Image (cartoon, grey):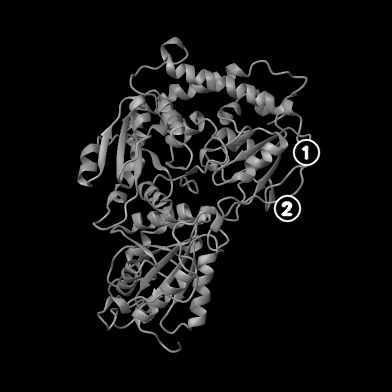
């Protein structure tokens, strides 16, 4: 078709091209300017061609779309009206940018002739996301072939894209028959959440991607593989082929198998760290200062592999950057891994024993009763059985899991993710709902969040009548504030007079009442046995398990963990593992 299209025709055409580009889920935040999109999406959903998710809060809508993209491994679109609605998507767009998720922002706009005139809900929204998203400003006069190419590119490329669609004239279709609001375009048949065998579709991310053309690394240097967020199985396979220790974060997709260390980040505070000569970094590690210090050490050979966003994690600017994960042609000396493995087993055992009988360990100056957050993390980690989805929040929950989750068995299709691109706490409820909706075939879906993270996005529980709801259990680690700050410099007693007010921020919120207002099932769990039992159940819809813990002992607990790590690495053989000189 040539010439100017009407607003309903433009909206329909854009949605058809998104469908051809592999989009099967669309999140809509209603508004007036986006009306032609809304009607076409409703009709497409009723026809079974697209799955429409309606949310009243654009910020939650953006993170829901991000979660859907993460869970389904497909590009996902979020549609908004004009004005401030678009700006509310910025946090989700930033996260998508830093993780390479294919988030497509379809922002309805008023025609460009009204920009700068003071017309209602008219602002300069094209390119509002700056460097975080590619932007295409589409008008009614944009040629079909140009529009088609831009939408196809947006669906295929990594990271977020804004399709800013100017809609002029009458916004509603002239025919009131819903059957005329949507027509499926010619193209491949849609299929629901794709299984790994279906990933030949170029617009579905492969569930497993293992490069075979990586650089061959020589053996000899004492090497540690660090797998950060979204590292994938290639990091694990490299560590297994070479026989190297693997420090893998819970959301790496590599905390699996015989080389993965449970307490790797704690062991990096011991003399073992001084014996490291080479580090291979895969994914985006963000959880600990010992890991950051290791991969930033100019005295080491550091190799860092580009992630899906095209960036190689190299905070010290010391790494040699690789495009794909390297490989080896033989296994290295196993004595190096064995030293780490033995220490890891001993340290894990001491931690577990101390949690079971804290009164028997005088080094634990625990003054408050109740459940230990570490013990809660152990139960959550154990609940991640085969075909389980786990979405884990930032701050303490993911760090507790990093210490307590025993590496999982391979080939069991677990899916452990979080928003680690920028490691923010915002949008996690909506993200978790999106991930669960994107993986309907999972045996069980769990989200493990802190109370501040949960409260930050309670709008994610706002799901109207008739909307799709996943079967999803939220485990909310509830300590009435921001416990992570107590383990940082500001948690020192010198700053105690201001700490509660400006860092801990106790809120006193009644989570049970909050859940009741959202018609969400709730249970307060004060027993580890009940928590373990609850996580084996199959809930119908969304439910919240609030697990109360104290944050008063967090700083002492962190010191206890460091002391245990030092205790297990006390007999290093200086002749075999000479200490490297570091500044």
Whole-percent x and y of residue 359? 41, 11
Badge 1: residue crowd in 10 Å (few <14, some 14–19, many ≥20): few
Residue under pointer 2: 213
Residue 242 relative to residue 251: left or right: right
Report the front residue among 8 and 203. Answer: 203
Say above or below: 180 vs 34: below
Residue 418 relative to residue 333: left or right: left
Query: What residue is drawn where x is 62% and y is 32%?
Result: 258
Whichever of callouts 2 and 1 sits on the residue coming sooner in the sequence is: 2
Q: In this view of the protein, can residue 205 be seen by the observer?
A: no
Disc 2 versus disc 1: distance between alpha carbons? 16 Å
Say above or below: 542 vs 185: above
Per the image, label 1 sits on a secondary structure element best described as loop
Q: In which quarter of the image is residue 37?
A: bottom left
Quadrant assignment for the N terminus: bottom left
Residue under pointer 1: 330
Per the image, label 2 sits on a secondary structure element best described as loop
| Disc assigned to residue 393 | none
Q: In this view of the protein, can residue 89 be seen by the observer?
A: yes
């Amino acid at each position: 078709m040539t010439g100017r299209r009407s607003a309903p025709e433009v909206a329909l055409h854009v949605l058809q091209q998104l469908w051809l580009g592999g989009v099967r889920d669309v999140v809509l935040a209603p508004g007036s300017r986006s009306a032609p999109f809304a009607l076409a999406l409703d009709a497409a959903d009723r026809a079974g061609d697209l799955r429409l998710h309606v949310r009243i809060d654009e910020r939650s809508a953006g993170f829901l779309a991000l979660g859907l993209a993460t869970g389904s491994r497909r590009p996902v679109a979020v549609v908004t009206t004009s004005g401030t609605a678009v700006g509310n998507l910025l946090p989700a767009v930033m996260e998508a940018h830093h993780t390479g998720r294919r988030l497509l922002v379809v922002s309805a706009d008023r025609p460009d002739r009204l920009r700068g005139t003071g017309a209602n809900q008219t602002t300069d929204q094209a390119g509002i996301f700056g460097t975080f998203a590619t932007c295409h400003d589409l008008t009614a006069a944009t040629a079909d072939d140009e529009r088609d190419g831009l939408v196809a590119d947006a669906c295929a490329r990594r990271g977020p894209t804004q399709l800013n669609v100017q809609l002029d004239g009458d916004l509603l279709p002239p025919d009131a028959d819903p059957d005329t609001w949507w027509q499926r375009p010619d193209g491949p048949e849609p299929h629901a959440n794709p299984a790994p065998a279906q990933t030949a579709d170029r617009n579905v991310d492969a569930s497993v991607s293992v490069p075979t053309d990586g650089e061959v690394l020589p053996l000899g240097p004492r090497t540690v593989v660090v797998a950060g967020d979204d590292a994938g199985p290639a990091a694990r396979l490299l560590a297994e082929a070479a026989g190297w220790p693997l420090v893998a974060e819970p959301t790496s997709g590599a905390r699996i198998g015989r080389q993965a260390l449970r307490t790797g980040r704690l062991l990096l505070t011991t003399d073992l760290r001084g014996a490291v000569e080479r580090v291979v970094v895969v994914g985006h590690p963000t959880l600990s200062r010992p890991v950051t210090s290791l991969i930033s050490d100019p005295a080491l050979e550091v190799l860092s592999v580009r992630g899906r966003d095209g960036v190689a994690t190299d905070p010290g600017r010391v790494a040699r950057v690789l495009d794909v994960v390297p490989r080896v042609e033989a296994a290295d000396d196993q004595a190096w891994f064995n030293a780490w493995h033995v220490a890891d087993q001993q340290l894990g055992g001491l931690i577990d024993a101390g949690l079971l009988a804290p009164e028997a360990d005088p080094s634990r100056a625990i003054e408050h009763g109740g459940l230990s957050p570490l013990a809660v993390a152990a139960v959550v980690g154990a609940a991640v059985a085969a075909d389980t989805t786990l979405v884990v929040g930032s701050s303490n929950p993911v760090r507790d899991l990093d210490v307590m989750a025993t590496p999982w068995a391979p080939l069991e299709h677990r899916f452990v993710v979080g928003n680690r691109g920028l490691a923010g706490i915002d949008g996690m409820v909506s993200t978790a709902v999106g991930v669960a909706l994107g993986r309907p075939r999972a045996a069980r879906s769990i989200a493990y969040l802190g109370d501040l993270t949960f409260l930050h996005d309670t709008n994610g529980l706002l799901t109207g009548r008739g909307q799709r709801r996943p079967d999803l259990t939220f485990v909310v680690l509830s300590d009435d504030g921001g416990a992570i700050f107590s383990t940082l410099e500001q948690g020192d007693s010198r700053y105690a007079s201001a700490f509660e007010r400006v860092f801990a921020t106790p809120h006193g919120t009644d989570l049970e009442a909050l859940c009741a207002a959202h018609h969400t099932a709730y249970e307060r769990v004060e027993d580890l046995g009940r928590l373990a039992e609850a996580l084996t159940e199959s809930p119908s819809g969304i439910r919240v398990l609030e697990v109360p813990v104290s944050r008063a002992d967090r700083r002492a607990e962190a010191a206890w963990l460091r002391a245990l790590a030092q205790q297990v690495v006390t007999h290093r053989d200086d002749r075999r593992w000479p200490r490297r000189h570091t500044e």
